[in-house]
């Protein structure tokens, strides 16, 4: 396994553990971290647009940059008050992912393939996303913990994929 891959796996694992162990603290700091990141990304997009001499075909960069900048600044200024909108946005993203899982389920089922994985994925994504949609502030910490667990699982999966010698079944 390459060193950069190992660092990525360790990074995902550490972030995942932090999310599982400190969901309340991460929830409290997230509006500032995300807001600041969005504002910086917005400035970067806007600068890239003007560096390209304001070409009309790159207007999407300018528009995206402006939206990211404004939303980022609002998240920072509203702090904990922005947890609701962030939770709602996260819920909508989760519902879209659940929709893709359901689509994969239908496609696999029509080909006669086992689709349990996609059904389970759909069910988990859909249920937790709907809970977050209707209770964005109350369920946000739960989603931070779920994100942490997902990052840990991804780390384990990456480790297994990148280093077949770690497979205990061999």
Image (cartoon, rainbow, N blue to C red):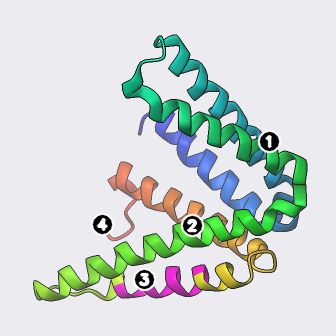
* Residue range (magenta): 119-129
Left or right: residue 169 compared with residue 130:
left
| Residue 50 visible in the snapshot | yes
Q: Could you tell me residue 17's position as x and y percent?
A: 71, 61
Residues at circles 3 and 2 in contact by the CB criterion of under 8 Å = no
Could you tell me residue 121's position as x and y percent? 43, 80
Which is in the foreground here, disc 2 or disc 1? Answer: 1
Asked if the residue at tag 4 contacts the one at tag 2, i.e. Cβ–Cβ closer than 8 Å, the answer is: no
Residue named by callout 3: 122
- Furthest residue in direction left, as rendered: 111
The reply to whether residue 20 is visible in this rendering is: no
- Which of the two residues, 28 or 56, is positioned nearer the viewer here? 56
- Give the residue drawn at x 53%, y 71%: 94
Secondary structure beneath dot 3 equals helix
Label 2 crowd bin: few (<14), some (14–19), many (20+), radius 10 Å: some
Q: Are marks 4 and 1 in contact (CB under 8 Å)?
A: no
- In which quadrant of the rendered image does the N terminus lie? top left
- Tell me if 36 is positioned left or right of 150 in this view: right
* Residue 141 sits above or below residue 135 on the image: above
Residue 138 lies in quadrant: bottom right
Q: Earlier in the sequence, mark 3 or mark 1?
A: 1
* CA neighbours of label 3 inside 10 A, class few (<14), some (14 to 19), many (20+): many
* Residue 148, quarter of the rendered image: bottom right
Name of the residue lying farthest toward the front: 56
Q: Which residue is mark 2?
A: 150
Report which residue position mark 4 lands on.
170
Q: Where is residue 43 shown, x and y percent of the image? A: 66, 27
Residue 168 % position (x, y): 39, 67
Residue identified by numbered label 1: 73
Judge depth for marks 2 and 4 and give the one in front.
2
């Amino acid at each position: 396994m390459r060193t950069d891959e190992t660092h990525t796996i360790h990074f995902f694992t550490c972030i995942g553990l932090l999310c599982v162990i400190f969901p309340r603290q991460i929830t409290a700091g997230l509006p500032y971290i995300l807001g600041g990141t969005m504002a910086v990304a917005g400035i970067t997009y806007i600068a890239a647009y003007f560096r390209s001499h304001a070409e009309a075909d790159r207007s999407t960069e300018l528009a995206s940059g402006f939206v990211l900048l404004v939303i980022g600044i609002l998240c920072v200024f509203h702090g904990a008050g922005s947890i609701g909108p962030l939770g709602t946005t996260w819920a909508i993203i989760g519902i879209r992912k659940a929709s893709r899982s359901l689509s994969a389920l239908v496609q696999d089922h029509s080909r006669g393939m086992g689709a349990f994985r996609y059904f389970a994925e759909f069910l988990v994504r859909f249920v937790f996303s709907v809970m977050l949609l209707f209770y964005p502030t109350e369920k946000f910490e739960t989603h931070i913990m779920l994100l942490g667990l997902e990052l840990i699982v991804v780390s384990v999966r990456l480790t297994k994929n990148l280093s077949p010698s770690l497979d205990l079944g061999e």
